[in-house]
Structures are given as C-alpha cells and as structure tokens.
Image (cartoon, rainbow, N blue to C red):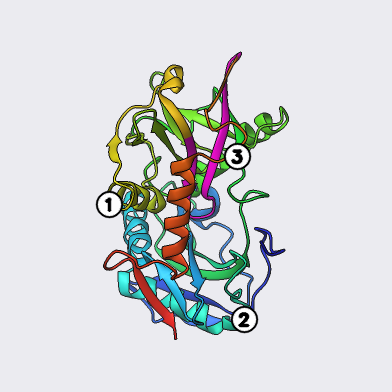
Amino acid sequence: MGNIGFEYVKTPFRFIAKWKDGEWDKGILTEDNVLHINESSPALHYGQQCFEGLKAFPTKDGKIQFFRVEKNARRMQDSCERLLMPQVPEEMFIDACRQVVLANKDLVPKYGNRETFYLRPFVIGVGENIGVKSAKEFMFIVFGIPVGSYFADELTPVSFKTTEYDRDAPNGLGNVKAGGNYAASFLPKKEVKEFGYAECIYLDPTTHTKIEEVGAANFFGITHDNKFVTPTSHSILPSITKYSLLYLAEHNLGLEVEQRDCLIDNLKEFKEAGACGTAAVITPIKSISHYNNEHVFDSGDGVGEYTRKLYDVLIGIQYGDIEAPKGWISIVSE
C-alpha cells in the first residue's frame, strides 16, 4: 500500500455548473475551491443537496479508467428527483468527471499502490430563499483528490457494533445519497468508536431486527452453503459496489445470490461477512456486537475465502488487470 490516506487536499482544478431559468449552463473548470453562495441558500438551511462518490483508476499500461460511472450519474439523478432538484444529464455528469481527472492528471496516483483519484460530484440548492421550499437556482460541482484506503488497512477484518439510532425513516431518504443521512450518522459513529469499534451497524427502522447498512457502506454475508446474501430495503442506498459484487459472485465465482432480510439474531447463518462501497471497497467484518452478544465470524482474524476472491476480482477489474463485463469500464485517458 502507498502512504496516501483518505483526506481532503486541495487539487488545482474543479468543475462548476449553474442551473438558472430552467437549464444548466456549460460549466467551467476553476482553481477556486471556495463556493460563493447566498446565506439563505436552501442547501444550508433545509439540506437540499446530494452527492456522489466514484474513483478514477490507474492501470498497468498507463491508462486511467472509470468503473461503472454511468451508474453514479443515474443514482445522482434519482437523488435529485427525490429532493426536487434539476437532474444533471448523464453526459454532463460523466464529462464533468472526465474534465476534472484530466485537469488534475498529474495527481492521479500511479498503478501499483491500490491508490486512486476519488471524485466527489454534488448538487446544492442556492440563491435567495427563506421559505421552506425548493431553491430557484442550483450548482453542480465536481472536485477530485488522490486517496488511499478508507479504513486504516484495506482488507483487514474489523469489528462493528449495532446502534439504537435509526439511519433513516421507513419511507424517508435512505435510498438516495442525501447529505442529511450522513450528518445523522456522526453521533452513532462517535459512540461506537469510543467502545473500540470501527463503525456502527444500522438496523431497520421499523422493527430493529434486520441489518440494513454498515456505517456508510452496504452489508453482505456468505452463508455456510456458499450463498452471497445482501439485505434489501427501501431504506438502503443502492450501492454500485454491492450490485457489482452480486454479479461477480454469481457469474465469476459461481455462487447463488440472494437479496433478502438479514436478521441480526441469525448471524450464525454466515461464515463470512463484509461491508462494501466505493470508499471502503470491501472491508471484511471480524465480528458484530449486538447488545451484550458478540458474534465472531468463522474466518476469525483472517479474511474469508470468498470475501478475498470477490475483492481480488473487483479490484482486478477496476485497475484493468481482469477483463470487465461489457459496459463496466470507460477510458478517461490513454
């Protein structure tokens, strides 16, 4: 691994476009990393904003490539629709991300250290507005930074603890990437980290009996009869990494896959478990603590067989070492 962490650094260029009078302008690249918005902007007072996270990957032959970038574009459109914001056209989203990578090309990490160039596109409601209503103007911004692992050591098993806090209401914003979902997670995360856990496990808000998310990542488990299982719920963010793993588990590893309830009181059905997402990639779960009970997965301090295989295939595709399914990879730079 390299020495880059997962922290913000100012890079030379970012992309900014503005929406006014019913349309987006063409947008520009700028060196200014400070946004200038009205103090009454709905993004500041009412949380009218959403974001995405994706990576540009360096390859052994010197290329830079995106992994399923169109999925990020469409997920942002879903978030914008739910938050009553204008959708960013898919072509505009991808082109903006490409412009930012190319403008900061010298800062894209080199192949070999499992480091990437992380992109953060987001949309915010701006302009003069004090009533509880949608903004009349919006901004779409994309900035990028070189990053390493989200957790301290990638593919090192870590322990998690359930929380009594709800990540989302049953028919709320859990399935979109709204900033408020993450602000609400700060306190639960702080509390479980004080007990020595890496993150918290969120249970379903209705019954508190089913696993929904692992911090800001999706959950998966490998059963003793080798099924890849992941929860399904309206409250779960549709992780691009998770859906990629569902495909790879079935088509590359030959596993049966299921999207269904994962009961917190039935963790014994899994011999392996993990958290997955763009930032976390795949983080093996060593144990889950629920009230006074701690379940340690069969893989113990090591990484489970199928968790490692899924990681190797996913990373291999993202960095261009393994042939990707059709349409998964788009080249940013030759």
Per the picture, the main secondary structure of the magenta-coloured stretch is strand
**Up-down relation of residue 46 to residue 51 (above or below):** above
* Circle 1: element type: helix
Camera-nearest label, 2 or 1: 1
Seen in the picture, residue 32 relative to 75 is either above or below; the reply is below
**Residue drawn at 68 percent across, 67 percent down:** 9
Residue type at tag 1: His
**Disc on res. 31:** 2
Nearest the eye: 134 or 303: 303
Q: Secondary structure at mark 2?
A: loop
Q: CA distance from mark 2 to mark 1?
A: 44 Å
Mark 3 and mark 2 lie on one chain; the one further toward the N terminus is 2
Q: Quadrant of the C terminus?
A: bottom left
Task: Estimate how packed mark 2 is, as few (under 14), some (14 to 19) or many (20 or more) residues with alpha carbons within 10 Å.
Answer: few
Other-residue count near label 3 (Cα within 10 Å), few / some / many at <14 / 14–19 / ≥20: many
Q: Quadrant of residue 118?
A: bottom right
Residue interval drawn in magenta = 273-292
Number of marks drawn: 3
The residue identified by callout 1 is 251
Tell me if mark 1 has few (under 14), some (14-19) or many (20+) residues whose alpha carbon lies within 10 angstroms of its own: few
